[in-house]
Amino acid sequence: MKKSKVYIKEGKQLKESITELFQNLGITNIKGKKVFVKPNMLRPAKPDEGVVTHPQLIFETVSFLLDKGANVLVGDNPLPNKTCNQIEIAKECGFLDVSHGQFRNIGRYPKKIKRQKNLLKEVYVSREILDCDILVSLPKFKLHNLTTMSIAIKNHFGIIPGGLKAYIHSLFPKIKDFSKVLLEIYRLRPPDIIIVDCLNIIDAKGKRFTPGKIIAGDNGHAIDYTCALMAGINPYLIPTLKIARDNGLF
C-alpha cells in the first residue's frame, strides 16, 4: 500500500500554507475543474465554539481555488433542523460570507448508490459530491463520544443528506457496525485533499483549546491516525482506524 504523507502547518499563514499543500499533494491541474469544498457544518454554531469548520479556512481555500480558475461549489449536509434550513445554518456558521457566493444547498437532489457487498446496501449521496472533479474536505478536529474522534472519516458522513443520517444511525446502533458503515461511505467518493481545521478545538468534555494549526493529506485514515497521536489517543482505540487496519485499508 502506498505510504501517505500528512502535513502539519501553522494556521497563522493560511494562504501560503494552502498553496503549498495543493502543490505538495500534486493537485495543480485546477483550472476549469469542478471543485467541491465540503466543510463541517454540523449545526448552527459560531466559529469560536469549535464545532464547525472555521470560516477563515473556508475563505482561504475557496479564494485559492477561484484564483486558479476552478468552478467551485461549497456545501454540507447538517443535522435536520426544524427552525432553519441549510442556507440559514450556513449563515449562522459564517459560511455564506466566506464562500464567495458559491455555497449551495446540496441535500435536494441526491443520487442513489447500491453496494450489495456493503453493510449499507443502498444509500443516497449528494449529487454535487459525486459530480465534482476534485473533492476538498475541510473537517473540524473534534473528539467524539461515539467514535472517539470526529475528523476526516466522520466528516464524510456529511455527504449523506441530513435526515438520512439519523436513519443510518438507527439501522446500525452498534459502534462497530456504524464504524464499518462510515468507512463504506468514505470509499464511495474519497476526498482528493483533506485539510483539518485545528485552529481552535473542543474536547469531549467541552474544554476549548487553540492549537492554531491545520493538518492535511489525501488519506483520511492517515490523517485520523496523526490527529489521534496529537490528541494523546492510541489510534487503534478509534473504531474506524482499527477496522481499517484489520481489513488492510491502512
Image (tube, rainbow, N blue to C red):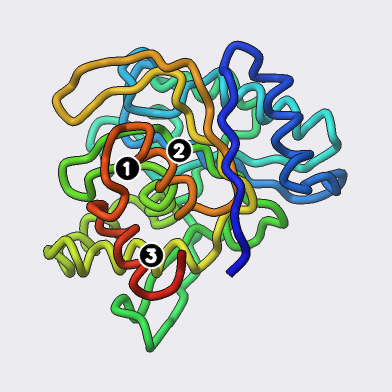
Q: Nearer the viewer, residue 238 or 39?
A: 238
Residue of label 2: 139
- For the point 45% across and 69% down, the residue is 249
Q: State the separation of the CA atoms marked 3 and 1.
A: 13 Å
| Amino acid, disc 2 | Pro
- For the point 43% across and 81% down, the residue is 114
Q: Residues within 10 Å of mark 3 (few under 14, many from 20)?
A: many
Residue 194, compared with residue 246, is above or below; it is above
Residues tagged 1 and 2 counted as in contact (Cβ below 8 A): yes
Q: What label sits on residue 150 in the rendered view?
A: 1
User: Residue 127: image x %, image y %?
Assistant: 55, 60
Q: State the separation of the CA atoms marked 3 and 2.
A: 16 Å
Residue of label 3: 183
Q: How many marks?
A: 3
| 43 with respect to 57 (left or right) | left
- Locate residue 13: give its quadrant: top right
| Amino acid, disc 3 | Leu
Q: Nearer the viewer, residue 137 or 126?
A: 137
Q: Residues within 10 Å of mark 2 (few under 14, many from 20)?
A: many
Q: Earlier in the sequence, mark 1 or mark 2?
A: 2
Residues tagged 3 and 1 counted as in contact (Cβ below 8 A): no
- For the point 55% across and 63% down, the residue is 189
